[in-house]
Amino acid sequence: MLIFNNKAGLKALLSEHKKANATIGFVPTMGALHKGHLSLLEASAANNTITVISIFVNPTQFNNPEDLEKYPRTLDDDVKKIQSVNENIIVFAPTVDEMYEGRTQSGNFEFGGLENQMEGSHRPGHFDGVGTIVKKLFEIVEPDNAYFGEKDFQQLQIVRRLVKNYNIPVNIVGCPISREPNGLAMSSRNQRLTEQERNEASVIYKILAEAKTIYRNEGEDAAKKYVSTAFSGHPDFMVEYFEIADEETLLPATAAKNGKQRAFIAVYINGIRLIDNISLN
């Protein structure tokens, strides 16, 4: 398995593959890999000649310094998991200085308003950081296809807009949410949960699923009321937001329900932030 810490070496290797008309699949991650990440790697490996995975905890997308400090970093274990999928996957694990060249700041991006909803309103500057690092990585790897999980659905839509705004020649592939057997959406942050907290956190998806049924039968207000009431019975949880939004624009769903709607939620359990979403159509 090839592991690169510098972009020049990676670009040189990929350039040779491109001369041979290889297709390049790319999975950008912040490490602490789980089965959800591995499913993205499997999708890439099945549909591309070469697959590259980046492992980089991007400081500019954290608006909470404590969250950045506590974010799990497990490179050795990540490499073993990658090898279990395919030993030919190329790993790009740069340092902060390699990516930002001594100036760790994000650029300013506009994503047609997508950046102002939900995660954007609760995490100021987050999507500027996402746009900065994803654009840098796309310029280094120059992939044909890039794979993102739908758990971060808003991020997926942001990346699609980034590619459109900057005419980046890459196909963005959204992949279904991977879940634990109890329904909890797989996340690197789950590693910070105790076993008891993981069990308790299964209620997030259960409440989302029930809210979907209520939304279909009784409408948006009833679904929102149900979610608020349901979490009131779980004192370890603090709901940051629950929103029902249009999938394309991420604006609040209209009463006419044109297009596709999706329910989004962010909750804290004992200080650990978890997000999830579910299609309502």
Image (cartoon, rainbow, N blue to C red):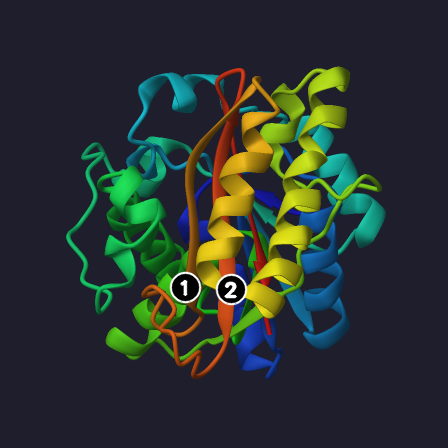
Q: Earlier in the sequence, mark 2 or mark 1?
A: 1
Residue 155, relative to residue 93: is it above or below? below
SS state under label 1:
strand
Q: Is residue 61 visible?
A: yes
Q: Position of residue 56 (x, y in %)?
A: 47, 38
Q: Residue at x 54, y 80 (%)?
A: 19
Residue 249, relative to residue 1: is it above or below? below
Q: Residue at x 22, y 69 (%)?
A: 112
**Numbered marks: total:** 2
Q: Amino acid at mark 2?
A: Arg
Verify CB contact (< 8 Å) between mark 2 and mark 1: yes
Q: In which quadrant will I find the C terminus?
A: bottom right
Q: Residue at x 67, y 62 (%)?
A: 176
Q: Quadrant of residue 253?
A: bottom left
Q: Which residue is mark 2?
A: 262
Residue 22, relative to residue 272: is it above or below? below
Distance from disc 2 to disc 1, alpha carbons, whole Å, reads 6 Å
Q: Is residue 25 visible?
A: no
Q: Nearer the viewer, residue 273 or 38?
A: 273
The numbered dot on residue 245 is 1
Q: Nearer the viewer, residue 209 or 111?
A: 209
The numbered dot on residue 151 is none
Answer left or right for 10 relative to 62.
right
Q: Amino acid at mark 1?
A: Ala
Label 2 neighbourhood size at 10 Å, few (<14), some (14-19), many (20+)?
many
Q: Position of residue 278 (x, y in %)?
A: 60, 58
Q: Position of residue 45 (x, y in %)?
A: 73, 66
Answer left or right for 210 relative to 253.
right
SS state under label 2:
strand
